Image (tube, rainbow, N blue to C red):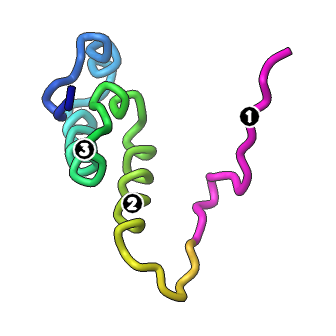
């Protein structure tokens, strides 16, 4: 089922109550834009992320649409160069 930004689930309602109204609107706008690039993403999944994380993901999706040519991709300072998963015990 494809979700849209106005389909915030009850599961996320408590989280949304803690967020200021302008922040909720910003997140809805970001989710709507992300869904234009990635229509199979669900609103429930995307609503788990902060506005900053959603903005970074949207920028990533927008950059991926353009030919890179000879320009390097510049990693943000707050993202690690290498990510690894270590299972517990």
Please indicate whether residue 5 sits to the left or right of residue 42 in the image: left
- x and y, in percent, of residue 47 in the image: 33, 30
Q: Nearer the viewer, residue 57 or 25?
A: 57
Tell me where the magenta segment starts and ends, as one range: 74-89
- Left or right side of 81 for 6: left
Residue where numbered disc 3 is placed = 39
Asked if residue 3 is positioned above or below residue 84 in the image, the reply reads: above
Dominant SS of magenta comes to loop
Residue 2 rendering spot, x and y as whole percentages: 20, 31
Q: Which residue is mark 1?
A: 85
Secondary element under disc 1, as helix, strand or loop, is loop
Observer-nearest of 76 and 34:
34
**Residue 88 within the magenta-colored segment of the rendering:** yes
Relative height, residue 74 to residue 7 (above, below): below
What secondary structure is found at the residue carrying circle 3? loop
85 left or right of 45 in image: right
């Amino acid at each position: 089922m494809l979700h849209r930004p106005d389909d915030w689930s009850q599961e996320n309602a408590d989280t949304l109550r803690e967020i200021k109204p302008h922040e909720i609107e910003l997140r809805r706008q970001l989710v709507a834009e992300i869904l234009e690039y990635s229509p199979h993403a669900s609103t429930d999944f995307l609503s788990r992320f902060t506005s900053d994380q959603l903005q970074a993901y949207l920028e990533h999706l927008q950059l991926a649409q353009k030919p890179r040519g000879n320009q390097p991709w510049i990693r943000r300072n707050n993202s690690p160069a290498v990510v690894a998963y270590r299972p517990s015990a």
